[in-house]
Structure formats: structure tokens, C-alpha cells
Amino acid sequence: MKRLLWVVVAGLLWVPVVQAKEAQLMGEDPVLEARMMALAEELRCLVCQNQTLASSHADLAKDFRHEIIVLMKKGKSDDEVVEFLVDRYGDFVRYRPPLKPTTILLWAGPALLMVGGAITLVVTLRRRRTLSTPEPLSADEQARLNSLLDKDDKSV
Amino acid sequence: MSRFILPLGLFVVLMGFLGVGLSLNPREIPSPLIDKMAPDFTLPQLHQPDKTFSRSDMAGQVWLLNVWASWCVACRQEHPLLVQLARTKEVPIIGLDYKDDSVAGLNWLRQHGDPYTLSVADAKGRVGIDFGVYGVPETFLIDQEGRIRYKQIGPLTPKSIAEIIMPKVRELKAAGA
């Protein structure tokens, strides 16, 4: 029984590994292809937008990978290859968007939200503290309290 | 009462953002090529593969480049509109048969009608990459200088032709004349 359980666990672990296997390569120059695949991990497949170029099986992704190899063979650097694709398809092909006026909200957004949240938290806590400490009694109130307490004492 | 105003305001703003987000089409990625020179290309013609066609052959004209393929389902949807548009003779349409088998492409044109002034074959899809093509059909409006002025991603619709493309064609023609 225990052995069967292990087989099941091993099976569960195995499946994602198989699925994560990269899309087919062309198989000529392993060094160049490794470099291409490393770069393709950073690039978005435009057909299936939540996949990288490296993991996508879409026809266009294959063409892109082929094109990247061709460019690398011509001696282009990784940055030049990315630039080639950005020139044609826009910043959307990059998984790490560059810092530009149009992407500033994207980069600064989480920090702004965090700062805003922290300020709200501090303000709320301060306000709560002032609410929980009762205001001191005014002179009139104190006098009335004293007289009431005195009266009480006498009746006992 | 006033303490509800801030959260309510934030909620309304958030709803606004989400509402706009819902109405956007994530498949439409704005092209960086708009208002830039169309890539120069030379490709064999679909009907006469021994002859070629280049972007410069259309210099001085406002024209449409329609990227299509016989395997593309959405192309069937827009094709009657292209045939109709070609009949008006207002703007030449060049067809780019993208990553297609030439025989299949020619058969397709025979079957559905040929609206193209001329067709070129981009069997490898290499010119397609230069034009930033990722979802066929795509249509580019190119001006007299060879600059891309508009790009339609996905099939043309009667509305996009009547309200965007043709007004732009007329405007460009008037500006160039």
C-alpha cells in the first residue's frame, strides 16, 4: 500500500517535469540554441500570451526562435535581438518591461499601494487611540459627579 | 457618514479601471510600426512566381496590404468585404499570402474571389515578422511615402472600413494630391 502511494506521488511529481520540457529545437548548434532558449525565456509568445517563446509550441513562436538563431549567427548580441523584436512587436514581447513614462505606473504602482496602505494604517491607529482614551471631565461635570457621590455616601 | 466617502470613492475608481479593462481586447497589441516606414520587402508574386513585387512599386499611392492565408478561418469572414471594397476601385489592395502553400492560396482565391490588385507569397513568413504580424488577418494602410498609417488586427468589419480605413484613405489622398 505504501509502495503504491509512493508510485502515485512520484507520478504526480513526474508529470509537470514532462510538461515543462521545452518546445522542439532545431538541433544544430547546442551552444547557440542554449543561448537562444535562455533569451526566449524572457520573451512573450504573442499567440499564446501567457507563455514564453521558449515554452510555446505555436507556429509563430517557432518562427521567432528560428529568427533569433539566425540573428545570433549573424553575431547580434542578446540586446540587439530583443531590440529587433521590440521594433516590430512593441514592448509587449518583453516579460520585463523597460522603465518608460508609459510603464511608470506599472513599476511604481506596488510601492505606491504599499506606502498608501501604510499611511492609512498609521492614521487609523492614531485615530483609534484618541477615541479609546476618554476626554477628561469638565469642571461642571466634576462638581456634579462629586455632589452625586457625596449624596450616595450619606444615604448609606 | 463622511467616513464612507473615501472607500466608496476608491471603489468607484477601481470599478472604472476594471470596466475599461474588460472592454479592451488583449489580443490587440498596439504596433510600434504606426507612422514609421513600412519595411522594404521583395517577394515573388503569387500568380507569377518568377516575377517579384516590392514596397517601392507602390510609391506615390495610398494602398492597403492585407495579410491573409488559405488556412486562416477569420479571413473567410472578411473576404467578401475586401471583394466589395475592391469593386469601388478607391484603393488598391495588395494581398500577402502568409505562410501558405501557393497552390492552396491560388485555389482559395479562385473559390472566394480575388480582390487583390496583386498578390505576393510570403511562404516562410519572414516579411510577416518584419511587419509585426502575429494574428492573421491583418491589414495595413500605407501612404504615398511608404509609411504605415493604420493597422487593423483581425478581420475587417463593415464598420472599420467605413469609419476608419476609408476616411483615412481619402484624407491621405487629399493630402498627397
Image (cartoon, coloured by chain):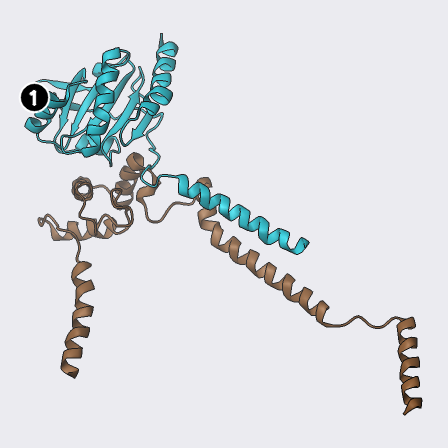
User: How many tags in the picture?
Assistant: 1
Outermost residue to the top: B177
Q: Of A155 and B135, which appears nearest the observer?
A: A155
Residue at (48% x, 44% y) in the render:
B17
Quadrant in which the N terminus of chain A is drawn:
bottom left
Quadrant in which the C terminus of chain A is drawn:
bottom right
Residue type pointed to by label 1: Pro
In x, y percent, where is residue A93?
30, 43
**Residue B26, image quadrant:** top left
Subunit that carries the residue with mark 1: B
Q: Of A156 and B109, which appears nearest the observer?
A: A156
- Can residue B18 be seen? yes
Residue on which the image places disc 1: B49
The residue carrying pointer 1 sits among few (fewer than 14), some (14 to 19) or many (20 or more) residues within 10 Å by Cα, namely few
The chain drawn in brown is A
Rendered position, B157 above or below A43? above
In x, y percent, where is residue A5?
17, 78
Specify whether B147 is left or right of B16.
Answer: left
- Can residue A104 be seen? no
Report helix, strand or loop for mark 1: loop
Rendered position, A58 above or below B99? below
In x, y percent, where is residue A95?
33, 49
Q: Of B120 and B38, which appears nearest the observer?
A: B120
Q: Of B64 and B24, which appears nearest the observer?
A: B24
In x, y percent, where is residue B77?
22, 29
Residue at (59% x, 63% y) in the render:
A121
Residue at (53% x, 46% y) in the render:
B13
Rendered position, B87 above or below B155? above
**Residue B110, image quadrant:** top left
* Colour in which the image shows chain B: cyan
